[in-house]
Amino acid sequence: LTVQLLLNSSNVIEVNNVRALGEPVSDATVEATIYDRNLAPVLGQVWPLQLQSVAPGSYRATANADLTLERGALYTVVVTAVAADTKKRTWEIETTAQADKVF
């Protein structure tokens, strides 16, 4: 699961290596929600966000740039994948929101 939350920027959520019985899965339903420190969904996006298959076993989505994020605040990103055979896997990662670096 890859997530970096940036203020005032589109945020990509990506999960790789989605597998069933050792084989990459490309037909799973994969959804993500970003929660604030009170475990409320972050404002500025309709949740859950649907991730699309971009390669066998890899899914990606882009959250809106106007998410209500606070610099340095802790967020929990939860991604759930449900395969066609109804097997389910959930990933959870904590991350902080940061200002986008301009070079």
Image (tube, helix red, strand yellow):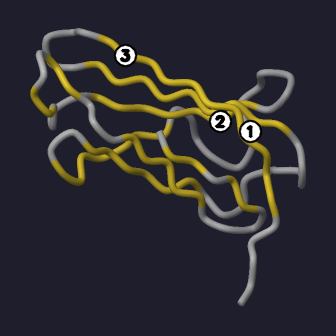
Please report whichever mark, 3 or 1, sits nearer to the chain's N-terminal start.
Answer: 1
What is the crowding at mark 1: few (fewer than 14 residues within 10 Å), some, or many (at least 20)? some
Taking depth in this image into account, of 63 and 98 the one nearest to the observer is: 98
Q: Which residue is mark 1?
A: 42
- Does residue 95 lie above or below 79 as drawn? below
Q: Which residue is mark 2?
A: 34
| Circle 3: element type | strand
Residue contact between numbered discs 2 and 1, judged by CB atoms under 8 Å: yes
| Circle 2: element type | strand
- Amino acid identity at mark 3: Arg
Residue 26 coordinates in the image, percent (x, y):
15, 37
Q: Nearer the viewer, mark 3 or mark 2?
A: 3
- Does residue 44 lie above or below 34 as drawn? below
For the C terminus, the image quarter is: bottom right
- Residue visible at 63% across and 53% down in the picture: 4
- Residue visible at 51% across and 32% down in the picture: 48
Using the numbered discs, state the Cα–Cα distance from disc 3 to disc 1 in whole angstroms. Answer: 22 Å
Residue 75 coordinates in the image, percent (x, y):
76, 36
- Amino acid identity at mark 2: Ile
Please report whichever mark, 3 or 2, sits nearer to the chain's N-terminal start.
Answer: 2
Q: Nearer the viewer, mark 3 or mark 1?
A: 3
**Residue 28 in the figure: left or right of residue 64:** left
- Residue visible at 43% across and 47% down in the picture: 14
Residue 19 coordinates in the image, percent (x, y):
20, 26
| Circle 1: element type | loop
Please report whichever mark, 2 or 1, sits nearer to the chain's N-terminal start.
Answer: 2
What is the crowding at mark 3: few (fewer than 14 residues within 10 Å), some, or many (at least 20)? few
- Residue visible at 75% across and 71% down in the picture: 100
What is the crowding at mark 2: few (fewer than 14 residues within 10 Å), some, or many (at least 20)? many
Residue contact between numbered discs 3 and 1, judged by CB atoms under 8 Å: no
Q: Which residue is mark 3?
A: 89
